[in-house]
Amino acid sequence: MQIFRILFHNNGKLYQLHAQQVQQADIYGFVEIRGLLFEQHTSVVIDPSEERLKDEFKGVEKILVPMHAVTRIDQVEAQGQNKILDLDGGVSNVTPFPLPGRGSDS
């Protein structure tokens, strides 16, 4: 079985999904994604972002993503984790201190 990792922009977030099929859609300018793959959890720890993705794509047979929103498509050996990432990295909750000469009151 082939496994693809697809990264695309959606509503200010970067989505990372794993699927069995990726191809050019019949609708011009779109990429068709089919056969989404989700990890089968065997432990008590569950990733909330993957659960959110499961809920968002529940019952979806295929996803059509505009070509310009696709960042990358990789064929991978093993399925990884599906997730939604903030475009700014989302790892820092620190606001930089304003510097002189930068800002609205200078």
Image: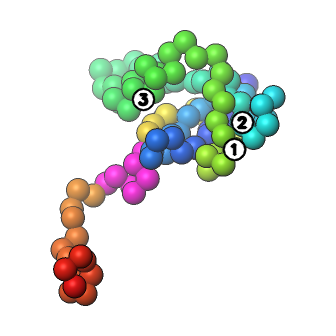
Residue tagged 3: 50
What main secondary structure does the magenta stretch of the protein show?
loop
Quadrant of image for the C terminus: bottom left
Q: Quadrant of residue 64?
A: top right
Task: Specify start and end residues of the magenta stretch as a single range.
Answer: 85-91
| First-in-chain label (1 vs 3) | 3
Nearer the observer: mark 2 or 3; the answer is: 2
Above-or-below relation of 22 to 99: above
Pointers 2 and 3 in contact (C-beta within 8 Å): no
Pointers 2 and 1 in contact (C-beta within 8 Å): yes
Looking at the rendered structure, the secondary structure element under dot 1 is helix
Looking at the rendered structure, the secondary structure element under dot 2 is strand
Q: Is residue 5 visible?
A: yes
Task: In this rendered view, identify the residue nearer to me: 104 or 44.
Answer: 104
Q: Hey, what amino acid is under mark 2?
A: Val
What percent of the width, then of the height, locates residue 93?
23, 56
Residue at position x 81%, y 28% in the image: 26
| First-in-chain label (2 vs 1) | 2
Q: Would you say 18 lies left or right of 30 here? A: left
Give the number of the disc on residue 31: 2
Give the number of the disc on residue 67: 1
Specify few, some or many for label 1: CA neighbours under 10 Å numbering under 14, 14-19, or 20 or more. Answer: some
